[in-house]
Amino acid sequence: MLSARQHASNIVCTLREHGRQAYVVGGCVRDLLLGREPADYDIATDATPQQVIAIFPQTFAVGAQFGVVLVPLPKTQSGESVVGTDEKVPVAEVATFRSDLGYSDGRHPDEVRFSRDPKEDVLRRDFTINGLLMDPATNEVLDYVGGREDLKAGVIRTIGEPEHRFAEDKLRMLRAVRFAARFDYEINASTMLAIQRLAPQIKQVSRERVREELTKMLTEGRAKRAFELLDKSRLLREVLPEISAMRGVEQPPEFHPEGDVFVHTLLLLEKLQAGCSKTLAWGALLHDVGKPPTFRVAPDRIRFDGHVEVGVKMAAEICGRLRFSNDETEQILALVDNHMRFADVQRMSESTLKKFLRLPGFDEHLELHRMDCLSSNKIVESYEFAKRKLEELPAEAIRPKPLITGQDLIEAGYEPGPRFKEILSVVEDAQLEGRLATREAAMEMVVREFPLPSL
C-alpha cells in the first residue's frame, strides 16, 4: 500500500513537474522533525485551486474559496482504489499560498488573497512549530519564523503578535494549551499573557469546536497537564466553570489524603491513557462534579450528601451545552451515576451484582473505579472483586435468556399493565440468583406470588 507520506511526496513532485512550488507544511513537518508519524499530510503550493484540479482530476474542492483541495490516492483505470477496501485511503490537503485579510467572525478570513510567496503563507499560520515547510524529496526545511528553535526549546509561540493571532480564531487559545500538553512544552510568556487577557472571548467559539478540542486534550495521554494549563491560562473557568469550582473544595483526609477535589480530579486525569474512549475521559473529568455544590462540614467529617445525583444533573447540563450525541451523553451520565456503587459491590445480592456487571460499557465503569481508587486511598479491593467476578461468570449467567415474557403472562390470564414490569423483575432476580431454571418453575412462582384475582 502506498503510504500517506509517499502519496504526499508524489503530489509535491507532480506539482513541481508542472512548474509549481510545493512543500509539505504544518503539523506533519513538526511531527517528522520530532520523530513522530504524522496523522495526515498537508501541502502548500503556489498553484491555484483550479490549477490543482486540472493537474489532479480526482479531487474534492472542499474549500476552494480558501484555496483548499483534497487529493485522494488515485484510482486504477478500472476505477478501483489501489488499496484494499479495509484500508484507509491516503488523502492529502493541498492549499494555495495565501494571505488572510480580516476575521470578522473570529474564525474565517473575510478575504483571501492567493500568493506565490511561501513566506507570506507561513506568516498567516498559528504557531511557529506549525509554520515549517519541507521538501519531502530532500527533507530540506524552510523556516521563516524560528519554528525549529522553538521545537528544540520546547516552546509554544504564536507567529507574530499573539493577540492578533488569537483575534483571527479564538480556538487557537485552546490549541496552544493542547499542543503544550501534548508535547510537554511551555507556552511562551507573551503568548500565555495574551490568552489570559482574551480568555473570556473563547465563548465566541462554537460549542462543538470547544468540545472537540477539550476531548483531544482528554484523550491524547496528557490530560492532567492540559487541565493544569487550562487553569493557569484562565480558560478553564470560561469553558468548564464547574471544574474550576473544584479548586479548594476540601475532602475528608481519611478517604482522600491526596487533597481537594481539583487535585483528586487531576490525579485521575493523569491516569487516562492516550487513545482512551471519549466517554471514559469525560466520565473521569465529571465523576465528582457534584461535590462543590454539596460540600458541607458535619460534626463527624466533611460530607458531600447527594453529590452523585447533583453530579448527574450537572453533567447532563454540560453534555447538552457542549452538544454531545445522545449515546455519548447516556454513557457519560451512567459513569457519573454509578461510580460510587463499587463501594457496595461485595455486599450486593447475586442478582444486583449481575445487573451491575452487565451495565453497557462496564469496562469503562471498572476502569473509572480503578483510577478513582488509585487517585485517593489506593484501596482496590472492590475493583479486584468486580474484575474477578466479571472474568468468572459466563456471559449467559450475567445476561440469561428470560424464562418468561409479557406474552406468557397474558396467556396465563394477567391483564397487561404497570405490574408486568414488577412481575418480570422478580422472576429475573430469582433466575439470576439460581432459584429458577425453567419456564414452568417461573410461572409457578408468578401464580404463587402474584395470584390472579378471584372471579
Image (cartoon, grey):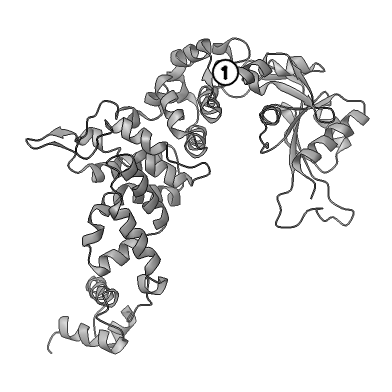
Q: Label 1: state its secondary structure.
A: strand
Is residue 186 something that shows in the picture? yes
Left or right, 360 with reference to 423: right
Identify the residue shown where x is 89% and y is 28%.
Answer: 16
**Given the current orientation, which residue lies at the most extreme left position?**
299
Which sits in the foreground, 121 or 345?
Answer: 345
Q: Quadrant of residue 403?
A: bottom left
Which sits in the foreground, 300 or 92?
Answer: 300
Q: Quadrant of residue 348?
A: bottom left
Q: Position of residue 370 (x, y in %)?
A: 36, 48
Quadrant of the snapshot with the C terminus: bottom left
Q: Position of residue 2 (x, y in %)?
A: 80, 46
Q: Position of residue 114 (x, y in %)?
A: 78, 20
Residue 135 to residue 99: above or below: below
Mark 1 neighbour density, 10 Å: few (under 14) some (14–19) many (20 or more): many
Left or right, 248 with reference to 85: left
Is residue 451 something that shows in the picture? no
Which residue is under mark 1?
155
Number of marks present in the image shown: 1
